[in-house]
Image: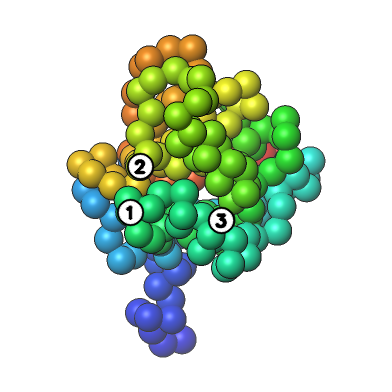
Amino acid sequence: MAFHPEADKPALVLYAVKRRIHQGRSVSSPQPMNEQAPSALRIVLTSIERVLPPHIRATLRPPAEAGDLAGLVSSVPEVGQLPADVCVLFSWHDGQPWNSPLSRKDNRRLLSVSEIGRECSFFADPTSDFMEPWSPLWLPVLTNDLGDFVVYETAGPSRGKLLHYWHDDQSRSVAYLSLQEWAVELLREHEQSEP
């Protein structure tokens, strides 16, 4: 059987990701996202879906519509377009219903595109009362439904990183270096908990 690098690229990327996971090494890079990151993220997300327990998988909504993703750009007008990995994430699934944790380790769930738009509108409203700091360059992608978020940094030196936003604490530490790092950790968690 002949090896075709382009045709076998997704399998090679998944193999490399899984190999690094099993070696206990990080698969993400703190450098700016390259062209291959969205396809690698897509592969990891597909792998996650295969290992999710049925009761968690059932909470995932269908993929976001292209028009909804285009509308989300208005939530971060300073950036002008959604980062490719954010588009990949919401093309996988458009969030989960309220109080449906994706991970067994924490109570966070994936926000929908419409919920992200509402949250960004809330934080952009000068009459809203919330804990600073907040940046208009942030997109909330995960929530615990108690006012806390994991936000995606859309621009600047921390572009692509996921930060903790706590509703009652000013700390804004890095949660993950990238969406791919988050996805790989979620994949690792569910692979390790498989029967």
Determine the secondary structure under disc 1: loop
Mark 2–mark 1 CB contact (< 8 Å): yes
Give the residue displayed 59% in from the left and 61% down from the top: 68
**Which numbered disc flags the more N-terminal residue, 1 or 3?**
1
Give the residue displayed 51% in from the left and 55% down from the top: 72
Answer with left or right where residue 152 lies relative to residue 51. Answer: left
The outermost residue toward the top is: 168
Q: Is residue 9 above or below residue 132?
A: below
Q: Amino acid at mark 2?
A: Leu
Mark 2–mark 3 CB contact (< 8 Å): no
Q: Is residue 6 above or below residue 167?
A: below
Determine the secondary structure under disc 3: helix
Whole-percent x, y for residue 51 in the image:
65, 48
Whole-percent x, y for residue 48 in the image:
59, 50
Residue 4 shows in the view: yes
CA distance separating discs 2 and 1:
7 Å
- 2 or 3: mark nearer the eye: 2
State the residue position of label 3: 90
